[in-house]
Image (cartoon, helix red, strand yellow):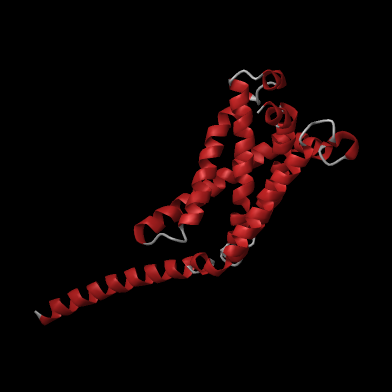
Amino acid sequence: MKRALKTFNARGNERLTAGVGIVLLLLSLAELVSVVFGVHAFMSLHVFVGFVLIPPVLLKLASTGWRFARYYTGARAYVEQGPPRLAMRLLAPLFVAATFVLFASGVAMAVLHGHALTVARQLHGPSSVIWMALLGVHVLVYLKRAFISSSNDVTRSSRASVRGANARAYLIAIAVVSGLVIGIATVPAQHHWVNLRRDHHHDRSDVRSAVAGGTIGCCRSGTAR
């Protein structure tokens, strides 16, 4: 246990958070590109990258949650490192909530139908906007620091200065590979997301047809009288 705590020390945890943060930034940029150029036109890419994001996101939540727990339980190294900036601490609960809603609603759109599917759609859009906005704030605040910390973990001269470099590299690699496996495994099911727009239009057409049919029926009944 003591050896594990030494491996995942405060500086090591900072480097892990920075490294997986860079991975998340690159994947999030790919998601943003799919949205900017038309999410329905690039739905397959959007869904694939969304699934690839899930394991790195979980790793990022784990590393930041570990720091939170160690700091507030009085671990000396984490206390000496200091707390996150106040603004970031205030935004953290919203960021975590937006993350959960965004990914849960995205996955749910493949399995839900009817009113539940409509609710999932309504949650996914706003949560993605909030998530991207909060991610932008985090990038502005932490990007320089993340690049420095992650580069220190790959530079030979500074890599060995913090215990656990190999473990951190393995964790990030496992998260990325797991995401790719999940993304590839869900390719056959991507038609659920690709057909969402078509189904949405069909639903609207069915409603219009029903309304129109009801109106015509009423008119015919009135004429018959």
Q: Quadrant of residue 96?
A: top right
Q: Nearer the viewer, residue 120 or 152?
A: 152
Q: How many marks?
A: 0
Residue furthest out toward the left: 225
Q: Nearer the viewer, residue 210 or 108?
A: 108
Q: Is residue 72 left or right of residue 78?
A: left
Q: Quadrant of the C terminus?
A: bottom left
Residue 178 at x, y percent in the picture:
64, 54
Determine whether 122 is above or below 189 in the image.
Answer: above
Q: Quadrant of residue 219?
A: bottom left
Q: Quadrant of the N terminus?
A: top right
Q: Quadrant of residue 134?
A: top right
Residue drawn at 58 percent across, 63 percent down: 185
Determine whether 215 is above or below 120 in the image.
Answer: below
Is residue 155 something that shows in the picture? yes
Is residue 31 something that shows in the picture? no
Residue furthest out toward the right: 157
Residue drawn at 84 percent across, 30 percent down: 161
Q: Is residue 47 left or right of residue 146?
A: left
Q: Nearer the viewer, residue 142 or 72?
A: 72
Residue drawn at 85 percent across, 34 percent down: 160
Q: Nearer the viewer, residue 95 or 217?
A: 95
Residue furthest out toward the bottom: 224
Residue drawn at 64 percent across, 62 percent down: 37
Residue 86 at x, y percent in the picture:
62, 24
Residue 203 at x, y percent in the picture:
38, 68
Determine whether 225 is above or below 188 in the image.
Answer: below
Residue 47 at x, y percent in the picture:
58, 60
Determine whether 216 is above or below 16 in the image.
Answer: below
